[in-house]
Image (cartoon, coloured by chain):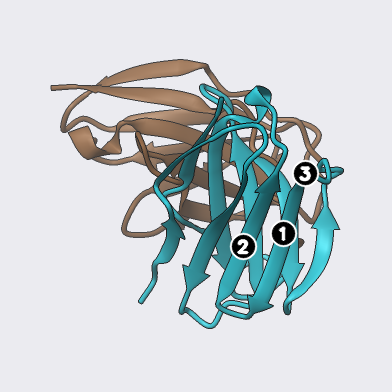
Amino acid sequence: DTEVTQTPKHLVMGMTNKKSLKCEQHMGHRAMYWYKQKAKKPPELMFVYSYEKLSINESVPSRFSPECPNSSLLNLHLHALQPEDSALYLCASSQGVAGVNNEQFFGPGTRLTVL
Amino acid sequence: DAKTTQPNSMESNEEEPVHLPCNHSTISGTDYIHWYRQLPSQGPEYVIHGLTSNVNNRMASLAIAEDRKSSTLILHRATLRDAAVYYCIPHFGNEKLTFGTGTRLTIIP
């Protein structure tokens, strides 16, 4: 199984809602990532988890709260988002956290719309 | 992070070879050159990576200049499925992939 799955595929939420994005992989990878991609722009790294511990936070606002409950799961909790947070949220995983052969495997993304 | 320069867009005819260039003149001696692509409505996918020598895999070939300041991704026989945005990313073994603006490749049937 070389797949990263993300749910839901689409999400529409109001600015006062609380929602969560979910990412799952069963490749035994120990690093997991959240990226944000605005339309017609490249993906931008948000968070990195290494061995279930947060290792990189790219100065992301606190209305985005990541969680890694186990080595296969990665969540992104959303609260009090702004319309400008509307984007495609991509999850990725890789075998390890360092080393040049750490190909990242990406999921299909969750397309988020904030009203 | 090393800065990369890629053409914004390229077109190629189906079943012909495609050469996608990337300039990375500020690359450090330890950075590998990674290529990812993003098909429409999908997440990025790894294509290939190399350090100094030319590299081949089932998807593509990577030709790296002797001074390592540029590289070329070669798709030997483009198909419609190869239409995507291609990203060239100098990268050394840490968690961070920094995507540039990439090249949008259009395949003409």
Q: Secondary structure at mark 3?
A: loop
- Give the x, y percent position of residue B45: 44, 51
Measured in 3D between alpha carbons, the distance from the residue under mark 2 to the one under mark 1, in whole angstroms, is 6 Å
Q: Which x, y percent locates residue B48?
A: 48, 54
Lateral position of residue A115 relative to residue B93, left or right: left
- In the image, A105 versus B53, the foreground residue is A105
Q: To which chain does the residue with label 1 belong?
A: A
Q: Please state which amino acid type lies under the numbered disc 1.
A: Pro
Disc 2 element: strand
Q: Quadrant of the N terminus of chain B?
A: top right
Q: Is residue B104 above or below residue A22?
A: above
Indicate the colour of chain A. cyan
Q: Which mark is residue A66?
A: 1
Chain letter of mark 2 equals A
Residue at the spot 55% in from the left edge and 78% down from the top edge? A72
Write down the quadrant of residue B99 in the picture. Answer: top right
CA separation, marks 1 and 3?
10 Å
The amino acid on which the numbered mark 3 sits, given as a three-letter code, is Arg
Task: Determine crowd level at label 3: few under 14, some 14-19, many 20+ residues with C-alpha closer than 10 A.
Answer: some
Q: Which residue is mark 3?
A: A63
Q: Which comes before the other along the chain, label 2 or label 1?
A: 1
**In this rendering, the label closer to the viewer, 1 or 3:** 3
Mark 2 touches mark 1? (CB < 8 Å): yes
- Residue bearing mark 2: A75
Q: Residues within 10 Å of mark 1 (few under 14, many from 20)?
A: many
Rendered shade, chain B: brown
Q: Quadrant of residue B23?
A: top right
Q: Earlier in the sequence, mark 3 or mark 2?
A: 3
Camera-side residue: B68 or A61? A61
Identify the element where label 1 is drawn. strand
